[in-house]
Amino acid sequence: MAVGSAAQRYASLKYALLAADILSLAALLFFFQASGLSYLLAQKAASLCPPGPCPLIFYTVIAGCAYLLVMFPLHFFQGFVLEHRFLLSRQSFPRWMSDHLKAAAVSYCILLLFLCAFYWLVRRFARHWWLLLSALWLLFSFLFARIVPLFLIPLFYKCRKVSDEGLRKRILALAEKMGVGVIDVYEFDLSAKTAKANAALTGMGKSRRILLADTLKEKYTHEEIEVIIAHELAHHKLKHIPKLIVFNALAVLALFYFVYLTGPAASAFFGAGSLADLAALPIVGLYAVLFGVITQPLGNFMNRCFERHADECALSVTRSFEAFISAFQKLSSQNLADENPHPIIKSLFFDHPPVSERIAMAHALRASGAG
């Protein structure tokens, strides 16, 4: 099978499955609320649990387990079958299942913290909960960005300092040149899970570190790795991370205010008392799904702008145009990227510019002598 046709088939299936995931979630939430099942579960939680957070924990554990079971066939095909079909995954089913359950547990803990804050604020500050919850969201976003490399990444990957001392010194010198402080350069065992390649600069402040996939080290020259890392460093040099956090916080503020304004009407439509009632939790979920679908194109557009700026900055610092072009050609082939998506697909699913645009930009900058 030719790489181009494989990438197109892989992309088409991936887009269809992502759309199916979102639509299925919305349908399940609507059914759970409209059928009265949410009311029955909330009643059972109130009768079995003492007052406080226990009813919420009982409700979300039961509803969450039901969601995982109902959605398992789709998630199994999406995360396991599809990746193996295109020779991208290297995980056995037990290892994939372990990661799937760990991701679900982490997501549940984060969701539970948010819901505890939501219900406490809605019940205590009926008129201003949306503003207070937005401020809490902003605080949590900065905290989360800081703790990701310390607690979450080690749950899924084994990390160690890069053993290639020449590459390590080269990357640390690049970070110093770009004025971005990092703890060190680490590699993680992505090859244990997938044939894809990736790199990242994670954390904030004293937790910031450079991460290289071992699959990247295997097939890329030092110059190619350097220009990829320069792109990641550029995000921090240009303050993209805090800008994105603030943008997301403003979007969440708009969502919470919209929920505050329309929540009573939505509750009445479903026959629920109010959003402060545990039985109305699926309505809150529907708001989140709908808002995510509406704002996704705008968020993707902003991310693509930041990615272009990071590419330009990386090329300005390294002047490695050939290495940039060859690196992204390799990444595109290795990851089966969709190089020329339809504009609608790009708007809905692409938070990075397509590879064809990034390579064209590098050619244009090299030809103009800019960058």
Image (cartoon, rainbow, N blue to C red):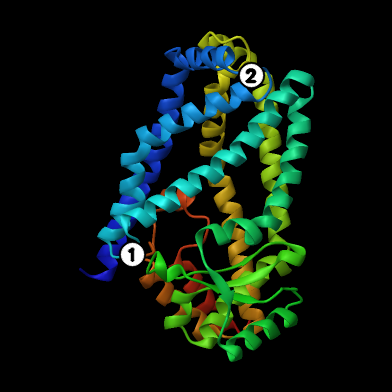
Q: What amino acid is found at the position of numbered circle 2 in the picture?
A: Thr
Q: Residue furthest bottom?
A: 166
Would you say 205 lies left or right of 43 here?
right
Q: Is residue 298 above or below residue 227?
A: above
Q: Point out residue 304 in the picture as x, y percentages from the top left corner.
A: 56, 58
| Number of residues whose C-alpha sits closer than 10 Å to that of mark 2, classed few (under 14), some (14–19) or many (20 or more) | few
Q: Quadrant of residue 191?
A: bottom left
Q: Point out residue 60 in the picture as x, y percentages from the top left corner.
A: 53, 28
Quadrant assignment for the N terminus = bottom left
Q: Point out residue 349 in the picture as x, y percentages from the top left corner.
A: 46, 50
Q: Residue furthest left?
A: 1
Residue 317 visible in this rendered orientation of the protein: yes
Of marks 2 and 1, the one in the foreground: 1
Residue 12 visible in this rendered orientation of the protein: no
Residue visible at 43% across and 49% down in the picture: 100
Q: Is residue 343 above or below residue 86?
A: above
Q: Are marks 2 and 1 in contact (CB under 8 Å)?
A: no
Q: Is residue 327 above or below residue 102?
A: below
Would you say 246 lies left or right of 19 here?
right
Q: Which residue is mark 1?
A: 88
Q: Point out residue 299 in the picture as x, y percentages from the top left corner.
A: 59, 48
Q: Quadrant of residue 367?
A: bottom right
The circle drawn on residue 262 is 2
Q: What amino acid is found at the position of numbered circle 1 in the picture?
A: Leu
